[in-house]
Image: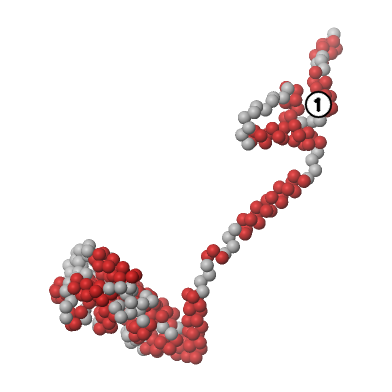
Amino acid sequence: SSRSGVLRAAIDRSATLQSAEALICEAVYSAFDLTTAEDRAILVPCVLHLLPLQEYKTSLKTEAVPVPQSAPHGRYGRAGPGDSNGPKIQGSILLQSLLRLPTPHNDIVIANITVLSMEERIKMAHDASGSRVYDVLLESPTVPPKAKREFVMSFIGHYHLLVDDRLGSRVGDRCWAFADTYLKEKIGRSLFIHEQFLAGSYYGKFFARNLNLYLLQRRPDEWKTLQADRKRAQDALTKHIPAPASTPVTEPASTDVTSKKSIKRKRHTQPEDEIDAVFNASLGKRIKKAALGDVAPVPTLPATEQRVSKKGRAPDNLQAVLGAIQSAPKDDKGHKKNRRH
């Protein structure tokens, strides 16, 4: 598995340049010792398990050996210590890269999947690594629509077993999304006899709810119209996705800025009283220069003016009156003493 990256890089480069695809397919056959046509019929299992032909056949014989209960169980798509021959993520990536090759050359994977038995295909869909191969088969633009349609139709009569699993239900939903109205009707009618099975399945009941089998049984014409409308809306949504840049994101901020500016202008245009006007005329410019980082020192006011500035700066004539009052001799104590005599 550590050397599969070189082969995958060669496949991806061939798909990008659209050249040497036949040589790449022969290299894949040679890497897994698949020489005859009979051997090449099991290309997908060998690549998915990352095992050459003889080792894969040996692993099939050892699968019947029971695993001890004390052995730890591996997660979905990850082989545990007792499951070293299970599907590998690197093998799944190789198959996905092969499916992205141009149409004549990706048939080595598509034809292999159709040759597999239904049990093996469902088992592959219930595996995390194998289900990703089905996703690329339905999504890749290089896979012909006819091959996708045949793949979806191959599960008819077995969809109740396919969707009875967490990963298999996801594959079933993708098959349902790809199908047209005619194919959806065939899938729905094939599940009439398995309706009770789907209702009792933890994952199958969600798939059956999406199909709306009750409406198909009672009013099939209305069901067809509903499915056609959904398919049309889905296609329109995938083709015409609005660009995220078209949304006006900066308009609210600009309106807020303009409103704040207008409020500030209104505040500046309001009439000021005489004390505020004198204060702004004398100290306003100095405060602004100090805020902008002017290093020039602000001249200090006299003590009498500092006392007045705490309450607000007054006009010059008012300051003169206040200065005269403060400089007058305070002989209150002398009068009080004379009164005592």
Could you tell me which quadrant the C terminus lies in?
Answer: top right
Q: In which quarter of the image is residue 120?
A: bottom left
Q: Residue at x 68, y 51 (%)?
A: 260
Q: Position of residue 61 (x, y in %)?
A: 14, 75
Number of marks in the rendered image: 1
Residue 172 in view in this figure: no
Q: Residue at x 81, y 38 (%)?
A: 273
Q: Compared with residue 101, is residue 298 higher up or lower down, i.e. above or below?
A: above
In terms of depth relative to the viewer, which is nearer, 285 or 71? 285
Q: Where is residue 158 in the image (x, y as percent from the top left)?
A: 32, 84
Residue 278 in view in this figure: yes
Q: Compared with residue 57, is residue 225 higher up or lower down, i.e. above or below?
A: below
Q: In which quarter of the image is residue 133?
A: bottom left
Could you tell me which quadrant the N terminus lies in?
Answer: bottom left
In terms of depth relative to the viewer, which is nearer, 285 or 270? 285
What secondary structure is marked by label 1? helix
In the rendered view, does 9 fall on the left or right side of 267?
A: left
Q: Which residue is drawn at 63% across and 36% down?
A: 292
Q: Where is residue 300 in the image (x, y as percent from the top left)?
A: 69, 24
In terms of depth relative to the viewer, which is nearer, 329 or 287? 287
Callout 1 amino acid: Gln
Q: Which residue is drawn at 27% across and 73% down?
A: 20
Q: Where is residue 223 in the image (x, y as percent from the top left)?
A: 48, 87
User: Circle 1 is placed at which residue position?
Assistant: 319
